[in-house]
Each structure stands twice: as structure tokens, then as C-alpha cells.
Image: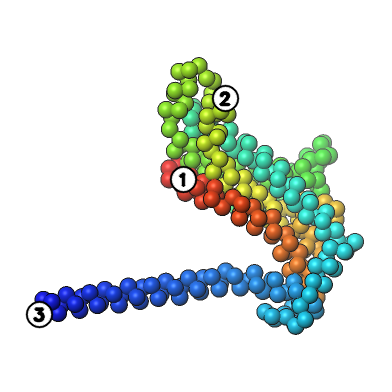
Amino acid sequence: MSDMGTFQQLRSSIKTRRKVSVALRLILAVFLIIFSIFPILWVLSASLNPTGTLATQKLIPDNPGFGNYTELLNSTQFPFWTWFGNSIKIATITAVLSLSITTIAAYAFSRFRFKGRQTMLKGLLLIQTFPTLLALVATFLMISQVGDIIPFLGLNTHASLILVYLGGAMGVNIWLMKGYLDTVPRDIDESAMVEGATHWQIFTRLILPLLRPILVVVGLLSYIGTYGEFVLARVLLKSNENYTLMVGLERFAGAQMSQRWGVFAAGALMGALPIMIIYLILQDLIVGGLTTGAVKG
């Protein structure tokens, strides 16, 4: 009887601990959900606030409406759709070029053995440890001088901004892509070589279709990084018609942020829609690419 009583007490204690553990997890989950959703709700509320100022901002605004959206879209001095199109164009071109260069470079690092391979890989990783802001002045001066010789790569051009973005996106993306490529069996390459296939044929016809998850991840990371980037775009772009969405909204609000907060919030929400849609469409491939690429480096 003594042993049976001890067993019942132990069983009851385990059940109690499990209930407490589940309760704590639920509380933590609810807290994290509220913590992550609250800023979005606050910005959404600001965009629907008819007064459009920070002083009268409430979570549930009085007489909500779409006046801020109308003011933003109908403004002639601040062309929202032009900025939006510039951001889409720059982010898309950067993502495509970065993906192309990254994939070829990662394939070479993963499949070929050549002198200086490890040094180059470590160098790429080392360069990424330095913040971009450290090179901001040097980047500005370099683009300014290049523009004197090649005008379409100078200041206030989208081509120069894309070029700078490409240089900053290579390191991490190459390492991520290489880690995924290392998980692809080399038997595929060897079997194809026996059949007389070249390295380019192996890469394009056999390896590339297997890289779809990591291609989506790298492309999306490049897209998001350039779509939402502000500092470099603010320094290199000078004219209103060339601004990206982030720079344009900052210029629109300017020193009158407290008075134009509602319009700024409306523009921020509209600008976030493309990223949200892409995430919803490609979420399965994103998870697969990140988890598989992190297994082996």
C-alpha cells in the first residue's frame, strides 16, 4: 500500500508539472503574439485615424476612415506610385542578379577544389562582419567619382544603387547557398560525368532544379533587404522621381512627422503588402530552404 501511495503521489506530481508547463507555454505564446501584433495594429489604427497626428493617436480611433490613404495616393508633390515602382524595380533587379551570381559562385565553392578556396570563403565571411555604415562615406565618394566617367553609374541613378546592393549581398548568400549545395550528393555529378555531361550541363539540368527551396530563400532575402533599405538609398538618390518608397515616405513626413503620421502609416502599410504576399505564397519553400541549408556548411 505504501508503494502504491507513493506511485499515485508521483503520478499526480507529474500531471501537475505538465499542467503548469502547458499553462506557462500558453501564457508565453499569448504574450509573444500580442507583442508582435500590437505594432501592426497601432500602425493600422494610425492609418485610419482621420486627424492623422501622433497627439490624438489611439488604438481604436474615433470616426475611422480612409482619408489618409486618399491624401497619400492623390498627392502630386509626393508621387507614391512612382516611389513604389522604383522600390519594386530596384529590389527585383537586385534579387535576380544577386541570385544568379550567388548560385554560380556557391556551385564553384561547393564542387570545385582550387587554390585559395578556403581563404576566399573566410574572406567573404570576414567582410560581412563589418557594418555597411562604416563604408558609407567611401561608397558615396566612389560612386561620385565613377559617375564622372560613367554617368549612368553615378549619383542619383538606380544602377549605382543596385551595384552597391549587389556588393553587399554576396557573402552571406554564398555561404547559405554553399551549405545547401553541400547536402546535394556528389554521386549526381559523377554519374552525369560518366555519361559525358559538362559541368555547365550538370549545373543547369541536374543541380539547379534541386536548389529551388534555397533559391527562393536567397532571392527573398535579397529582395527584402533592398526593398526596405533606407540609408544607402537616402545617400545616393537625390531627386524626387528617383526615390525609393522608404526614402520617399521619409521625405514626405519630414519634420512634420507628428502632423503627417497617419499618411506615413498608410504608406508604410501599403508598402508592406508585396513582402507579405510573397511570404504567404512561398512560406513552405522558405522553411525548407532555411532548415536544409543550415544542416551542413
Quarter of the C terminus within the rendering: top left
Upstream in sequence: badge 1 or badge 3: 3
Report the Cα–Cα distance between label 2 and label 3.
75 Å
Upstream in sequence: badge 1 or badge 2: 2
Mark 3 residue type: Ser
Report the Cα–Cα distance between label 1 and label 3.
52 Å
For the rendered model, the colour scheme is rainbow
Residue under pointer 3: 2
Where is residue 32? Give x, y as percent.
Answer: 51, 70
Marks 2,3: beta carbons within 8 A: no
Judged from this view, the residue extending furthest toward the left is 1
Q: Looking at the image, which residue is at 40% across and 75% down?
A: 23
Quarter of the N terminus within the rendering: bottom left
| Residue 292 image label | 1
Where is residue 235? Give x, y as percent.
Answer: 76, 54
Residue under pointer 2: 200
> In the rendered image, which quarter is residue 245 located in?
bottom right
Report the Cα–Cα distance between label 1 and label 2.
24 Å
